[in-house]
Image (spheres, rainbow, N blue to C red):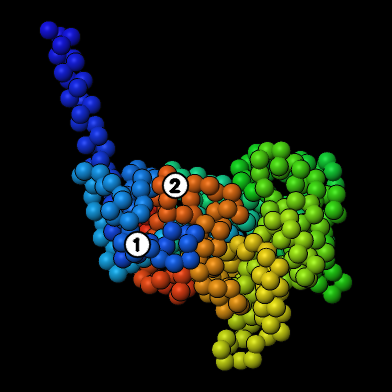
Amino acid sequence: MTQRLLFVLAGAAFSWMPAALNAQALVLRPDGVFDGTTPTVHRGWVVVVEGDRIAAAGPERSVRVPRGAREIRLDGLTLMPGLIEGHSHLLLHPYNETSWNHQVLYEGMALRVARAVVAAEATLEAGVTTSRDLGTEGAGYADVGLKQAIERGIISGPRLLIATRAIVATGSYGPKGAPEWSLPLGAEPADGHDDLIRVVRDQIGRGADWIKVYADYRWGPNREARPTFTQAELELIVEIAASSGRPVVAHAASAEGMRRATLAGVATIEHGDGGTDEVFRLMAERGVALCPTLAAGDAILQYGGWRRDIDPEPARITAKRESFRRALAAGVPMCFGGDVGVYPHGDNVRELELMVDYGMAVADVAIAATSGNAGILRLEDRGRVAEGLLADLIAVEGDPTTDIGSLRRVRFVMKGGEVVRDD
């Protein structure tokens, strides 16, 4: 009798479980869906979310909606993948508030981390569900703790890919001044075979997802960008990082720094101001992506007094437009990454608006900010609205494939199946 009762109870439990699981399912009904890959918006689509994943997405007639699923209507909105930011600094805040030197030299760690907590929340609220943070700029390994706090639900923020301290050649990076003193630096110096191996491995051991190296810096005779590491040193950095499964990202603004970094096997190059047709062709051939960081230079010039749309365009902006267009023409994969931190966190879309202004098609920019960056950053589980991927989703007013400004009108944010913003 007891055995029979157990079978009955077990059967009842199994019949109950699917209904209980289905009760956790969500069905999202927007006006349209931008799937992250197709340069148009799908009408009549629904998206089903179960747990932290997309269970189904497509025309309503072809999607099975689980019984008991909770419906979220997104009337008037376009559902799309969460944005993936490729170049951020959560531990910096805008330079018109406090200069970079002052932040590195005088702002205490607790203050910088407190600012970063607020910045992480603003980033997620703006629709950025993943962010590659490329260096703590003097704040040590604080990004490791930020990432852990987000993952454990202690604070709100995007999924983070972190680079910890970044690597620079001795004598190249700042802050500078008072040559008699050894000032705190914004990155970790390393040189030569043994030292580079040790530093790369140490940063990996402390939590780096990416290794960032400064392939050049403004240390030329006239403060122009000149290469810092030799070709052999860059190749060694890439080799050591790759043996642990980590990619390398290079800061490079000079043509020679970009060339060396590309030949060394880095995954992305940041800035790229001095890129030539030859260098951009090499990048395209090697599949090396460019994060042009248009918004950072634009912001710095405005901090210096330039009034956009009022004053004549500075030569630096004109040159940046031209290099960006040459990169596009060469077929270089374009990474969305604005160096946010130089300008306010949460204003990430500023970079996307400038990518359009500088000549990239709106739909291509929207793809770059979603599935494009997912591919470049090696994130196979996000960046598209498709079955089995992470339910990192946002909804915006308007059509992001025709109006980049719609990405400023975020009204709904979901990360891992949890609604974190619903206007």
Please state, as top left, top right, bottom left or bottom right, where the C terminus lies in the image. bottom left
Image location (x, y in percent) of residue 102:
64, 67
Residue drawn at x 66%, y 59% as measured from the top left: 289
Of residue 200 and residue 417, the one placed in the foreground of this image is: 417
Disc 1, SS: strand
Q: Which residue is mark 1?
A: 412
Q: Relative to residue 30, is residue 152 drawn left or right? A: right
Q: Residues within 10 Å of mark 2 (few under 14, many from 20)?
A: some
- Identified by mark 1, the residue type is Phe
- 169 in relation to 175, above or below: above
Q: Which residue is mark 2?
A: 389
Image location (x, y in percent) of residue 153:
41, 46
Residue 177 makes an appearance in the image: no
Residue 144 makes an appearance in the image: yes
Q: Relative to residue 190, is residue 242 drawn left or right? A: left
Please state, as top left, top right, bottom left or bottom right, where the N terminus lies in the image. top left
Q: Relative to residue 411, is residue 267 drawn left or right? A: right
> Which of pointers 1 and 2 indicates the residue nearer the eye?
2
Q: Residues within 10 Å of mark 1 (few under 14, many from 20)?
A: many
Image location (x, y in percent) of residue 100:
64, 67
Would you identify the image quadrant in which residue 133 lies?
A: bottom right
Disc 2, SS: loop
- Identified by mark 2, the residue type is Leu
Image location (x, y in percent) of residue 122:
44, 63
